């Protein structure tokens, strides 16, 4: 499980679509799908239900989402701190 995979997961859920998330993240939709397949393989359960109308969270996805959101928020805060504390910033 990588920080990138968790960030991608959060974005997909937020936007409700792999297509929209791929655009927002500036990655190929196939790469985004592959990262979600790897994440689901690692946790051992499906996290997203895919359909023509978009994606919905599975029960396990609903359990992971708040954790992934918090991790994503902490990473963004840490990146912001690193930028603010850089000499000359």
Image (cartoon, helix red, strand yellow):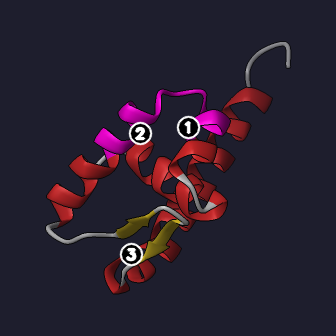
Q: Which residue carries the number 3 mark? A: 61
> Residue shown at 73%/28% (left/top)?
83
Residue segment shown in magenta = 22-35
Lower sequence index among marks 1 and 2: 1
In the figure, is residue 81 to the left or right of 25? right
Q: Which residue carries the number 2 mark? A: 32
Residue 32 within the magenta-colored segment of the rendering: yes
Q: Is residue 57 above or below residue 89?
A: below
Q: Position of residue 7 (x, y in %)?
A: 51, 49
In the figure, is residue 70 to the left or right of 84? left
Q: Is residue 63 above or below residue 10?
A: below
Q: Secondary structure at mark 3?
A: helix
Q: Secondary structure at mark 2?
A: helix
Q: Position of residue 75 (x, y in %)?
A: 56, 48
Are dots 1 and 2 in contact, CB under 8 Å? yes
Neighbour class for label 1 at 10 Å: few (<14), some, many (≥20)? many
Q: CA distance from mark 1 to mark 3?
A: 19 Å
Q: Which residue carries the number 1 mark? A: 22
> Residue shown at 56%/37% (left/top)?
22
Q: Determine the image quadrant of residue 30.
A: top left
Q: Is 7 or 79 nearer to us in this picture? A: 7
> Residue at the right extreme?
89
In the rendering, which numbered label is found on residue 68? none
> Residue at the bottom extreme?
59
């Amino acid at each position: 499980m990588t920080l990138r995979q968790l960030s991608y997961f959060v974005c997909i859920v937020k936007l409700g679509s792999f297509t929209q998330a791929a655009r927002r993240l500036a990655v190929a939709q196939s790469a985004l799908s592959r990262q979600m397949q790897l994440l689901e393989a690692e946790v051992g359960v499906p996290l997203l239900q895919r359909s023509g109308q978009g994606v919905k969270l599975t029960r396990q996805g609903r359990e992971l989402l708040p954790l992934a959101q918090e991790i994503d928020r902490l990473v963004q805060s840490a990146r912001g701190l690193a930028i603010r504390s850089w000499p000359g910033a």
